Amino acid sequence: MVNTNLRGVFLALKYEIPHMLASGGGNVVVTSSSNAIATTEKRSAYAASKRGLVGLVQSAAQDYAAKGFA
């Protein structure tokens, strides 16, 4: 679950961002889930991976906002 939902987006950003920096900026759209905020039983791995996306994207946005990313 974490490899697909969180690591997959991390790797996509890792390889997208250098190209976007070279072209002067851009936008990244990442979808998460309402389970990132509130979840139900037996969904701990899914909810954790989706909540991790929220933190990953917020942090990346702050890291690259001054370089033309939205």
Image (cartoon, rainbow, N blue to C red):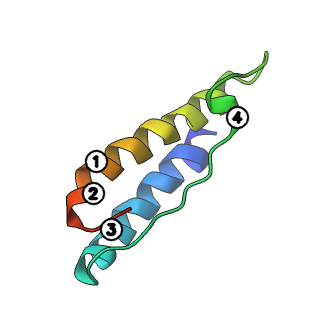
Badge 1: few (under 14), some or many (20 or more) residues near its Cα, within 10 Å?
few
Residue 63 in picture, x, y percent from top left: 24, 50
Q: Is residue 34 above or below residue 3?
A: above
Front tag of 3 and 4: 4
**Which of the marked residues, 3 or 2, is nearer the chain's N terminus?**
3
Residue highlighted by disc 2: 65
Residue 41 in picture, x, y percent from top left: 79, 15
Gap between marks 4 and 1 measured at Cα:
22 Å
Name the residue: 39% across, 70% down: 16
Residue 55 in picture, x, y percent from top left: 43, 36
Badge 2: few (under 14), some or many (20 or more) residues near its Cα, within 10 Å?
few
Quadrant in which residue 66 is drawn? bottom left
Residue 34: which numbered mark, if any? 4
Front tag of 1 and 3: 1
Gap between marks 2 and 1 measured at Cα:
5 Å
Q: Amino acid at mark 4?
A: Ser
Residue highlighted by disc 3: 17
Q: Amino acid at mark 1?
A: Gln
Name the residue: 68% across, 40% down: 33
Residue highlighted by disc 1: 62
Gap between marks 3 and 4 measured at Cα:
26 Å
